[in-house]
Amino acid sequence: MGNSSCVSIVERTVHIPSICARYPEVAGMEDETVQGRINELIQGKVYKLIKGQMFKTGQEKKVWSDFAVKTNGLDILSILFKV
């Protein structure tokens, strides 16, 4: 990602009954196709984590999530989800 100085992280939130989930979205990449795919992967992971937590005990329950974003010198994006 040679253009990493132009890339930013935007916070998104999902609010539906019993769920409040915050997750990151990548913005400002030169390659919008790659940016769209990254955001699809992030959103898919968030929904998978939420679904897994909601039905983990066999009963529907309230779910909250948060995230932390880390980068390193190699322009690798790491996301820690807390559910």
Image: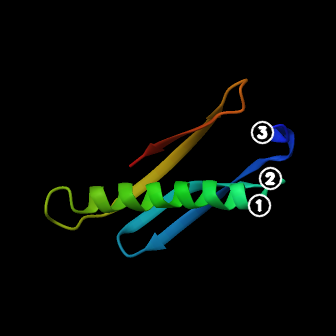
Q: Amino acid at mark 1?
A: Glu
Q: Are marks 2 and 3 in contact (CB under 8 Å)?
A: yes
Write down the quadrant of residue 27 in the picture.
bottom right
Q: Residue at x 28, y 57 (%)?
A: 52
Q: Amino acid at mark 3?
A: Met
In the picture provided, is 24 more to the left or to the right than 64?
right
Q: Residue at x 47, y 60 (%)?
A: 44
Q: Give the residue pinned by disc 1.
A: 32
In the picture provided, is 10 more to the left or to the right than 65?
right
In the displayed image of the protein, which residue is found farthest to the top? 73
Res 1 label = 3
Q: Give the residue pinned by disc 2.
A: 29
Q: Amino acid at mark 2?
A: Met
Res 6 label = none
Q: Earlier in the sequence, mark 3 or mark 1?
A: 3
In the picture provided, is 17 more to the left or to the right than 39?
left
Write down the quadrant of residue 68 in the picture.
top right
**C-alpha separation, residue under disc 2 versus residue under disc 3:** 9 Å
Q: Is residue 9 above or below residue 69?
A: below
Write down the quadrant of residue 54 in the picture.
bottom left
In terms of secondary structure, where does tag 3 sit?
Answer: loop
Residue 73 is situated, as x and y percent measured from the top left of the image, at: 73, 23
In terms of secondary structure, where does tag 2 sit?
Answer: loop
In terms of secondary structure, where does tag 1 sit?
Answer: helix
**C-alpha separation, residue under disc 3 versus residue under disc 1:** 13 Å
Q: Are marks 3 and 1 in contact (CB under 8 Å)?
A: no
Q: Are marks 1 and 2 in contact (CB under 8 Å)?
A: yes
Near-viewer residue (30 or 64): 30
In the displayed image of the protein, which residue is found farthest to the bottom? 17
